[in-house]
Image (spheres, rainbow, N blue to C red):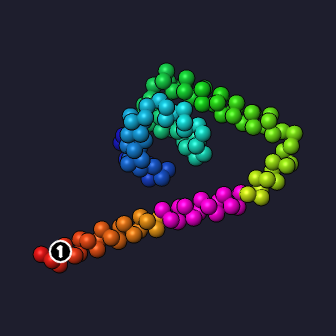
Amino acid sequence: MPVIERYGHWLFLKLEIVEKTRYYYDKYGDRLLLISFFIPGVRQFIGYFIGIIRVPYQKVLPYAYTGAALWIIAFFSIGYFFGEPWQYMFSIIEQYLKYFFLGGAVLVGGWLLVQVQRAKGSRYKGKVRNQGE
């Protein structure tokens, strides 16, 4: 992929990212294409990456159309079932959304704290071993 190696930095695209995408595609296969339509941010760029790693159209099209259809059906259903009392649903979501994000922030913060403690612990054990020798 000489083009990515040469011009990828202009698009913030590194060869490692392309290789990681290829690894995930090899690991999860075509299911990755179907799921990627439901992940914000990934949905916008998956087309570029599947083109770069040379996934054949015959494999992409059924999953792309199925993913798009499921996306439309999901949001159409949400609108259909919550269409009438949308103001009520909006007020409930607005009321509890801050608690949802606060809980998520606490979980992420706790996870990061555990990761930092593990990293510090492994460095400390290495120093103790080196001093004991």
Q: Which element type, helix, strand or loop, lies under badge 1?
A: helix
Q: Is residue 27 visible?
A: yes
Residue type pointed to by label 1:
Asn
The residue pinned by badge 1 equals: 130
**Is 56 located above or below residue 24 in the figure?**
above
Picture coordinates of residue 78, whole percent (x, y): 75, 37
Side (left or right) of 105 relative to 16:
right
The quadrant where residue 104 appears: bottom right
Residue at the spot x=38%, y=34% of the render? 26
Work out which residue is located at the far top of the displayed protein and give it.
58
Picture coordinates of residue 113, whole percent (x, y): 46, 68
Q: Is residue 31 magenta?
A: no
Side (left or right) of 20 relative to 130:
right
Picture coordinates of residue 126, whole percent (x, y): 23, 71
Picture coordinates of residue 108, whole percent (x, y): 53, 61
Side (left or right) of 36 relative to 68:
left
Work out which residue is located at the far bottom of the displayed protein and give it.
131
**In front of the other: 10 or 86:** 86
**Is 63 located above or below residue 125 in the figure?**
above
Q: Is residue 101 magenta?
A: yes
Q: Residues within 10 Å of mark 1 (few under 14, many from 20)?
A: few
The quadrant where residue 43 appears: top right
**In front of the other: 11 or 114:** 114
For the record, the magenta segment spans: 97-111
**Is 67 located above or below residue 129 in the figure?**
above
Residue at the spot x=29%, y=71% of the render? 123
